[in-house]
Image (cartoon, helix red, strand yellow):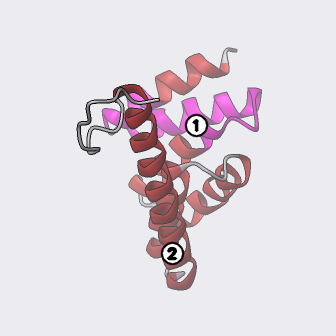
Amino acid sequence: ADPASEYELGEMARTARVWNDALEHFGRALRSEPDFPAALIGLGKSLVSAGRAPEAVAPLEKAVRLEPDSLVAHYQLSFAYRRVGRETEARKELALYRELHEKQQQASLAIRTGFNGDISSPQTAEPPE
């Protein structure tokens, strides 16, 4: 009855490529918590892997709506769209994935620079402010 536990069991089954078990566990997680983005993504991945890409689109679209900044959700939705022949939507999702990836890379660099200082600045006799 615990959605987080069902999600983890679903991930274990997905990793082991036991699609029916993965689908069952992700389904249980989503019955308890319908707006669980990670379970929606896991369900979508498992459906695509099980050869059921048309069924994967809806949960992945919902995951993108719930977490519009999720790299994984956009990438997986792009993959599902491509599998069902929706090339225009697949390209759009892949572009969103790339845009978000670039933003996250820039944010990561800014954080590292904040912690470590701007190591690309020339050394001076005066300490930085």
Question: Is residue 84 in view?
Answer: no
Above or below for 74 versus 26? below
Residue lying at 59% horizontally and 60% vertically, measured from the top left: 55
Q: Give the residues drawn in magenta, as a range.
A: 11-40
Residue 62 drawn at (x, y percent): 70, 53
The question of residue 32 being in magenta is answered with yes
On-image quarter of the N terminus = top right
Pointer 2: what residue? 90
Q: Determine the secondary structure under disc 1.
A: helix
Mark 2: which amino acid?
Answer: Ala
Residue 10 drawn at (x, y percent): 49, 30
Residue 59 drawn at (x, y percent): 65, 52
Mark 2 to mark 1 CA distance (whole Å): 20 Å
Looking at the picture, tell me which residue is in the foreground, 46 or 103. 103
Residue lying at 45% horizontally and 35% vertically, measured from the top left: 111
The question of residue 12 being in magenta is answered with yes
Q: Do labels 2 and 1 touch, CB within 8 Å?
A: no
Which callout, 2 or 1, points at the residue further toward the start of the chain?
1
Looking at the picture, tell me which residue is in the foreground, 28 or 34. 34
How many residues crowd mark 2 within 10 Å: few (<14), some (14–19), many (20+)? many
View extreme (front): residue: 125
Residue lying at 44% horizontally and 58% vertically, measured from the top left: 102
How many residues crowd mark 1 within 10 Å: few (<14), some (14–19), many (20+)? many
Which secondary structure class fits the magenta region best?
A: helix
Mark 1: which amino acid?
Answer: Ala
Pointer 1: what residue? 38
Looking at the picture, tell me which residue is in the foreground, 34 or 51. 34
Question: Is residue 14 in view?
Answer: yes
Q: Determine the secondary structure under disc 2.
A: helix
Residue lying at 55% horizontally and 45% vertically, measured from the top left: 41
